[in-house]
Amino acid sequence: MPTTQLIAANDFCIYHNIELSFIQSLNQSGLITVIVVEEKLFVEENELPQLEKMVRLYHEMDINIEGIETITYLLQRMNDMQHQIAELNRRLGLYEG
């Protein structure tokens, strides 16, 4: 069973110069999952790329949490559609070939 490394949310916030409330807001909106260990917040290592994108949207583009939710939803839908198109093309290739 693979082990997941946990990153302290407080350390992440200090490194990226953001408030801990930002991470808590993302957690409340369901965009990331926060793990609580001994009353400290942690984020799984595999969520860091997505979390860093959200920090950039928030800081560099001044997009609020609701906007980040919308962007994340639309990007996921687009990714799902791309996978569906690839699968349909693969299936179509079986009939053409």
Image (cartoon, rainbow, N blue to C red):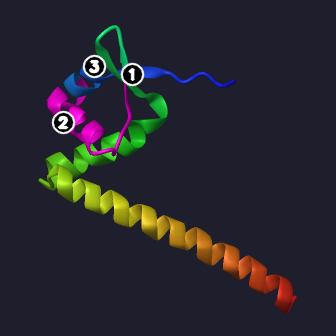
> Which amino acid does the dot numbered 3 rest on?
Asp
State the image coordinates of residue 93 (x, y, percent, origin top left).
Answer: 79, 84
Residue count near mark 2 (Cα–Cα under 10 Å), binned few <14, some 14–19, many ≥20: some
State the image coordinates of residue 65 (x, y, percent, origin top left).
Answer: 19, 50
Mark 2 to mark 3: distance in Å?
A: 13 Å
> Which amino acid does the dot numbered 1 rest on?
Ile
Q: Is residue 70 magenta?
A: no
Q: Are marks 1 and 2 in contact (CB under 8 Å)?
A: no
Residue count near mark 1 (Cα–Cα under 10 Å), binned few <14, some 14–19, many ≥20: some
The segment highlighted magenta reads 15-35
SS class of the residue under badge 3?
helix
| Residue at mark 3 | 11
- Rendered image: mark on residue 68: none
Residue 28 vs 79, above or below: the answer is above
Q: How many marks can you see?
A: 3
Outermost residue, top side: 38
Q: Are marks 3 and 1 in contact (CB under 8 Å)?
A: yes
Q: Residue at x 28, y 47 (%)?
A: 54
State the image coordinates of residue 38 (x, y, percent, origin top left).
Answer: 34, 8
Q: In screen coordinates, is 84 left or right of 81?
A: right
Residue 21 vs 64, above or below: the answer is above
Outermost residue, bottom side: 96
| Residue at mark 1 | 7
> Which amino acid does the dot numbered 2 rest on?
Phe
Q: Residue at x 38, y 35 (%)?
A: 33
| Residue at mark 2 | 22
Q: In screen coordinates, is 84 left or right of 32?
A: right
Q: In screen coordinates, is 89 left or right of 26?
A: right
